[in-house]
């Protein structure tokens, strides 16, 4: 007969081990993760959400997963959700050995050794280390008698494990969080302006992942974040205070919550400025209630526990690779499009303009990211990459796109440049007057469509 | 401990359809009831029913209850398509629960002797209610009298009388937390084909009503009142006062609706501190005396 504790251990390891591991033996899974973690140090960033493919670049996914499992095991032991005496013989000893091995080979060097400049240093006050050390302290003697858990504690712990499991399977949420906690997050978040132009642009991004022909990321994950954070807040409401403290410590993904609230707050602010019909007072009130119930209470709880912020990191490669064969200048583009239009191929001309804008958008973004990364490395201003040259061409291409009535694609590419230029004080250099008019037109068109849909 | 930890549900008939579904299985040797939860449009098995596992664990009344939280692609597919696999799992739960559904969700090493549920309750929220009823009507002919006598339906904010599509979208995607969410919902209606089924007067809902009426008349020819309708065709229905998403008209021979104050379309099915109506609704289903 399988005991509850055996089932609980299996569930904890399976949920935190991520989608790539599928074994029915939780101890073997843990041992494998520990073995993979050796010499790959966890950081105080969001390693657990980096995809396995990027592990070599940005840190140890496995080490972060071991810390995640350790934290859940520790909380489970603390409340009696997991009872060592109910595990099959040898399981407790094997768990102890695996976690001790991780401590010696991974955690201690991570806390003491030199680190890459790109990796946020793991610190002793990291809440995951706190839970891990509390767990390791249990292994100094025979397993202590487990407390008899209350039904409420079991139920809320079950919910927390379920929440942690669901997080691992939400790729959009993981991307959103990595963007939001990136060291170049302001540049990444400029991209949000593409879908915030109007309800119609937001809807298109929501349903298709594109605004016009520009791919956009972040929107699906942002909406997921709203749901997961609300779920976490509900669990904190239900749990007793000490258990709630441990949930907050363990919910690493929700730390530095002010960055998430700031990004989503920008969405809410922009959306509340959409002027179609009467003011959305109930939506504004719902957002305020959400802020109080979720963001404020999490921020206060994290501050109360002294949880340190997540270290911003560069979670993605800033070299995108050039789209070869594409026109890169507006002069080159107009020469081609004029020929195509003269031949009666207006659709082909529009397509060419959209492809050119996509290529130059990548160039511009890559340069802007490299500039920001170099600035953070301390490079002198004069040596920083300049993104304004291709940006000027991109904006001019957006005007070309607009002449082909592809206002949505034009606005989607122009909006981030517009936001970035204003933020970096480069509006004058990029002569954004025309672009501003283009964005206003796109916004008004989107609003008018939304109004018609509402009335229908 | 009354139940094992929540586990992924992998049932034999699903063919991958229910990925993301969860099961909360009783540790009792012979559980007597299966609760099958179906989320609404854009919802999820975990988030829509997030508080129910806790409620089930906390009540001695549900110690012998297995709960199945089904995840289905509500955004991408229409009602009839979503209902087909629900019909299959319903048939399995009534006939072969252990080998076809439960075994795959039991923790490693755990076993149960062969058993049959004495009661299977479909619990739907919003679109989930429409999918649940469609699934019942579609599988009806395959069910024996005994199967039917063990089957019941409980709905929270069902969309079976139609709904405001923009508001359904806004709620389903979590946009109702954001100002301007209703505008986005309005703009989104053209993107999701599954939504058309849930608009007032849609062919899908008209067919659902007609099929329900035909099934009722076939079950009790010449029946004059709703009270004559057998239990498997009559849903218990709960509606929230602040629900602006779904129409709250009575459907066919369902029981008179139960109003809930201070709740909206999203929160009506979420038990919380000071709000136990959803749990009471489930308990009432367990209390109902089934025909022998």
Image: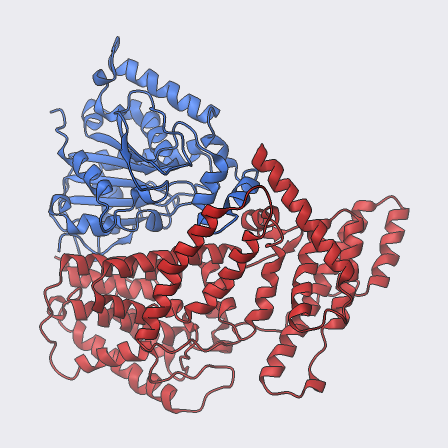
Chain colours: A red, B blue
Q: Is residue B142 left or right of residue A332?
A: left
Q: Nearer the viewer, residue A302 or A255?
A: A302
Total label count?
A: 0
Instruction: Tell me the residue at 54%/57% (across/down).
Output: A269
Give the position of the C terminus of chain B as an image quadrant.
Answer: top left
Q: Is residue A153 visible?
A: yes
Q: Is residue A215 left or right of residue A57?
A: right
Instruction: Tell me the residue at 26%/78% (across/down).
Output: A98
Depicted A305 relative to depicted A234: above or below? below
Query: Residue B216: horizontal and vertical position, in percent?
Result: 29, 17
Q: Is residue A149 left or right of residue B191?
A: left
Q: Is residue A177 visible?
A: no
Query: Residue A236: horizontal and vertical position, in percent?
Result: 28, 61
Q: Nearer the viewer, residue A428 or A80?
A: A428
Depicted A430 relative to depicted B255: above or below? below
Query: Residue A314: horizontal and vertical position, in percent?
Result: 53, 75
Instruction: Tell me the residue at 41%/59% (across/down).
Output: A291
Q: Quadrant of residue A47?
A: bottom left
Depicted A258 relative to depicted B243: above or below? below
């Amino acid at each position: 007969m399988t005991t509850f504790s055996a089932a609980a251990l299996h569930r904890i390891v399976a949920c935190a081990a991520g989608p790539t591991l599928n074994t029915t033996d939780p101890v073997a899974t843990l041992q494998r993760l520990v073995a993979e973690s050796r010499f790959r140090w966890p950081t105080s960033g969001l390693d657990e959400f980096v995809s396995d493919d990027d592990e070599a670049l940005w840190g140890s996914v496995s080490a972060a997963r071991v810390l995640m499992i350790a934290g859940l095991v520790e909380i489970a032991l603390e409340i009696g959700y997991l009872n060592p005496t109910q595990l099959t013989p040898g399981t407790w000893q094997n768990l102890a050995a695996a976690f001790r091995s991780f401590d010696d080979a991974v955690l201690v060097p991570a806390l003491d050794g030199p680190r890459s400049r790109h990796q946020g240093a793991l610190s002793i006050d990291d809440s995951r280390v706190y839970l891990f050390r509390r767990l390791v302290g249990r292994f100094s003697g025979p397993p202590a008698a487990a407390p008899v858990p209350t039904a409420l504690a079991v139920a809320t712990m079950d919910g927390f494990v379920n929440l942690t499991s669901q997080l691992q399977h939400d790729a959009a949420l993981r991307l959103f969080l990595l963007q939001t906690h990136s060291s170049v997050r302001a540049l990444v978040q400029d991209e949000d302006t593409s879908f915030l132009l109007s309800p119609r642009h937001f809807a298109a991004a929501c349903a298709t992942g594109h605004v016009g022909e520009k791919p956009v990321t972040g929107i699906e994950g942002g909406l997921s974040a709203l749901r997961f954070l609300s779920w976490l807040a509900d669990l904190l409401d239900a749990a007793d205070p000490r258990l709630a403290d441990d949930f907050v410590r363990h919910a690493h993904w929700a730390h530095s919550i002010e960055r998430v609230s700031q990004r989503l707050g920008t969405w809410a602010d922009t959306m509340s400025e959409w002027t179609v019909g009467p003011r959305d007072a109930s939506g504004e009130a719902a957002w305020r209630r959400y802020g109080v119930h979720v963001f404020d209470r999490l921020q206060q709880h994290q501050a109360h526990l002294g949880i340190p912020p997540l270290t911003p990191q560069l979670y993605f490669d800033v070299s995108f690779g050039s789209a070869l064969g594409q026109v890169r200048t507006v002069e080159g583009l107009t020469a081609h499009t004029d020929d195509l239009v003269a031949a009666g191929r207006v659709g082909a001309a529009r397509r060419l303009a959209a492809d050119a804008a996509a290529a130059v958008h990548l160039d511009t973004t890559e340069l802007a990211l490299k500039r920001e990364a170099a600035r953070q490395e301390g490079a002198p201003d004069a040596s920083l990459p300049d993104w304004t040259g291709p940006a000027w061409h991109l904006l001019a291409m957006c005007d070309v796109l607009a002449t082909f009535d592809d206002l949505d694609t034009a606005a989607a590419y122009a909006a981030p440049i517009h936001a970035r230029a204003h933020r970096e004080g480069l509006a004058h250099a990029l002569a954004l007057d025309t672009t501003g008019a283009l964005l206003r037109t796109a916004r008004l068109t989107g609003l008018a469509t939304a109004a018609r849909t509402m009335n229908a | 401990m009354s139940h094992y930890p929540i586990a992924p549900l992998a049932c034999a008939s699903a063919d991958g359809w229910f990925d993301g579904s969860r099961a909360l299985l009783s540790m009792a040797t012979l559980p007597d009831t299966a609760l099958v939860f179906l989320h609404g449009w854009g919802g999820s098995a975990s988030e829509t029913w997030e508080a129910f596992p806790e409620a089930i664990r906390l009540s001695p009344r549900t110690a012998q209850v297995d709960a199945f939280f089904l995840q289905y692609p509500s955004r991408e597919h229409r009602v009839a398509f979503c209902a087909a696999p629900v019909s299959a799992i319903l048939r399995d739960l009534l006939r072969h629960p252990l080998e076809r559904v439960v075994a795959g969700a039991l923790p490693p090493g755990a076993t149960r002797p062969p058993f049959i549920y004495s009661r299977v309750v479909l619990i739907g929220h919003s679109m989930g209610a429409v999918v649940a009823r469609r699934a019942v009507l579609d599988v009806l002919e395959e069910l024996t009298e005994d199967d039917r006598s063990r089957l019941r339906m409980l709905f929270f904010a069902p969309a079976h009388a139609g709904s405001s599509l923009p508001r359904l979208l806004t709620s389903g995607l979590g946009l109702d937390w954001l100002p301007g969410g209703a505008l986005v919902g309005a703009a989104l209606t053209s993107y999701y084909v599954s939504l058309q089924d849930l608009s007032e007067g849609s062919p899908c809902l008209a067919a659902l009503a007609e099929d329900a009426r035909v099934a009722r008349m076939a079950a009790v020819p010449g029946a004059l009142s709703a009270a004559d309708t057998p239990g498997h065709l009559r849903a218990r229905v709960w509606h929230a006062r602040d629900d602006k998403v779904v129409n709250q008209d009575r459907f066919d021979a369902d029981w008179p609706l139960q109003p809930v104050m201070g709740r909206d379309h999203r929160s009506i099915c979420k038990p919380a501190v000071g709000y136990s109506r959803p749990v009471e609704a489930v308990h009432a289903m367990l209390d109902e005396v089934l025909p022998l």
